[in-house]
Each structure stands twice: as C-alpha cells, then as structure tokens.
Amino acid sequence: MKPARSWLFVPADSEKKIAKAISGDADALIFDLEDSVAPANKEAARKIIGNLDPRKEGGPQWWVRINPIGTEEHKKDLQLIARFDVSGIVLPKAESGADVTHLAHSTGNIPIHAIVTETPASLFGLLSYRDVASPLAAMSWGAEDLSAALGASSKRGADGDLAFTYKMARSLCLAGAVAAGAQPVDGVFTDIGDEAGLIAEARAAAAEGFTGKLAIHPAQVGPINEAFTPTDEQVTEAQAIVDAFKAEPDAGVLKIGGKMVDLPHLKQAQALLERAHGLT
C-alpha cells in the first residue's frame, strides 16, 4: 500500500459527501465515525459505511476513524470493522504504543494510523510506538483536541504561528513516527478559505520530513498532493547524488553541481526517489 499524500476526512453520516470523496483525488479517505458525527447519528453512520459498494481498483484507500478506546461506540465500531472492506483504521486519542497493540488484538493485522497528540498524556509517549510486531502504518498529530484538553484559549500566538506547545507536539509526532518506521502525517489546516496558507504549511511540512497531510475539505486535496509530490528538479538532483555515490562507493564526500554532499545527503536522496517511484 502506497503512503498517502492527502488524507481526507469524510463524515460517515453523509452519503453525499462520501460519494463525492470516493470520486475525488484524495490518496486516502478517512470515513469519520468520531468527532464529525453527532452521537445520535453514529449508528446511522455505521450503516452507511457498511452498505458501501466494494472499493474500486485504483481508487483511494479507505480508512475508518473509529471512536476512542474505552468508549461504548468504540466497541460498536469494531463490529463494523470486522465486516467492512477497509484499508486501515484511524485510532484517535492514542496515548502510547500500547493502545495500538490493544486495538490490534481485536482487529488483527489491519494497518493502523494513530493520531498521537490529542491528550496531554500522549505527549510523553511518542517513543513507545516502536514495536516491530505492530501494524502501525502512520502517525499524525492534532492540535484541536489537545488545546481543548489543556484549557487553552488559542493554539496560536500573536504572530499567527503555532504556540510552542503545539509546535512541540508536531515535532514529537514527526520524530516518533520516523523512529517507529511509520509514515509521518501532518495535521489539519483548519482555514479552508486560505489556500495560500495551506500551500505554505504543506510545503513546510514536506521540507521538514512529513510525507502526507490530513485534509478536512476536498478543495485542500490538490494543494496537498502537489506539496508532497517531489518535483522533477528534486528527482533529478536526487538521482545525480545516488549515481555519483554509486560510481564512487568508497567516497564519504563528493562535489556535485558545485555543492559538497555526504552520506546523509545520499540517504535523503534515496528516500526522495523511493517516494517519487511509489507515486508512479
């Protein structure tokens, strides 16, 4: 399964939005049974998801965000997962790798995408996701639930940038995901009318090491896909680095295009080429 660039949340109780999303360009759809569905509509949402036609070959991945571990709705969601054609499960409010292991005991080897920074306690467990036997496939971070749990009045400072606490959560998610061998996925950009802001944030996330981003509106999918697709220039530069070290395997440092590059640059180039080839 290819790492997804765009992960689009879709309320599971809206047949219209689901139909539109399935025919759209998102790499992965997250049918949401949690925050975007009112308690009174959760059973109806499960029925809608359960009655969907099978996924089409070549279409987007289908993931389901279930309700948090320990809730009654979580148990009902697992009954749906047992009979639904799903690419993976999105686990909200994850606080440690133990939560992924706990879920896997009920779901087997179905891939899990854990949202790992939504509670205060979760910030202290980002290294615990390193388990070679885990079906963990991706990790993303969330500021909305975290800020509510902390009693914050705002997630951003006077300059509009994320406040320190949320920058820290984001960085810990990135490092924790890479340490666990999972895909690091950046959080949502909530201002759906600010395309320039979305593009800037997505490009910055890609430059830092994230390889995908959560989306909350179909209009965000295109800019996200573009931001996380290596450009032709990047691919050419990466290939030149790989070729140069292949030609001189015993070299520690080489001069390529007027720049000095070493083994960390080679690793970066190899990772970029792997992502680029995975998208073709």
Image (cartoon, grey):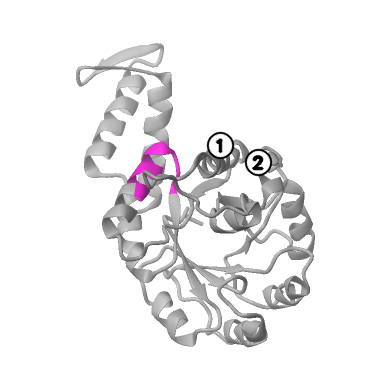
Residue at 67% x, 57% y: name it: 93
Query: Quick check: 110 above or below 76?
Result: above
Residue 130 in view in this figure: no
Q: Is residue 266 left or right of residue 37?
A: left
Q: Amino acid at mark 1?
A: Ala
Of callouts 1 and 2, which one flags the residue occurring earlier in the amino acid sequence? 2
> Helix or strand or loop: what does disc 1 sit on?
helix
Q: Is residue 95 left or right of residue 197?
A: right
Residue at 66% x, 61% y: name it: 110
Q: Any mark on residue 175, and which?
A: 1
Query: Quick check: 13 above or below 251?
Result: below
Q: Residues within 10 Å of mark 1 (few under 14, many from 20)?
A: some
Q: Any mark on residue 240, and which?
A: none
Label 2 near label 1: C-beta < 8 Å? yes
Q: Which residues are magenta?
A: 201-211
Q: Does 206 lie within the magenta span?
A: yes
Q: Which residue is mark 2?
A: 126
Residue at 60% x, 39% y: name it: 176
Location of the C terminus by quadrant is bottom left
Query: Quick check: 127 above or below 96?
Result: above
Q: Does 167 lie within the magenta span?
A: no
* The quadrant where residue 124 appears: top right
**Measured from the top left, where is residue 127 in percent x and y?**
67, 37
Q: Is residue 85 left or right of residue 245?
A: right
The residue most toward the left is 258
**Measured from the top left, where is residue 87 in percent x and y?**
57, 66
Q: Amino acid at mark 2?
A: Leu
Q: CA distance from mark 1 to mark 2?
A: 8 Å
**Measured from the top left, where is residue 254 in percent x and y?**
31, 14
Q: Residues within 10 Å of mark 2 (few under 14, many from 20)?
A: many
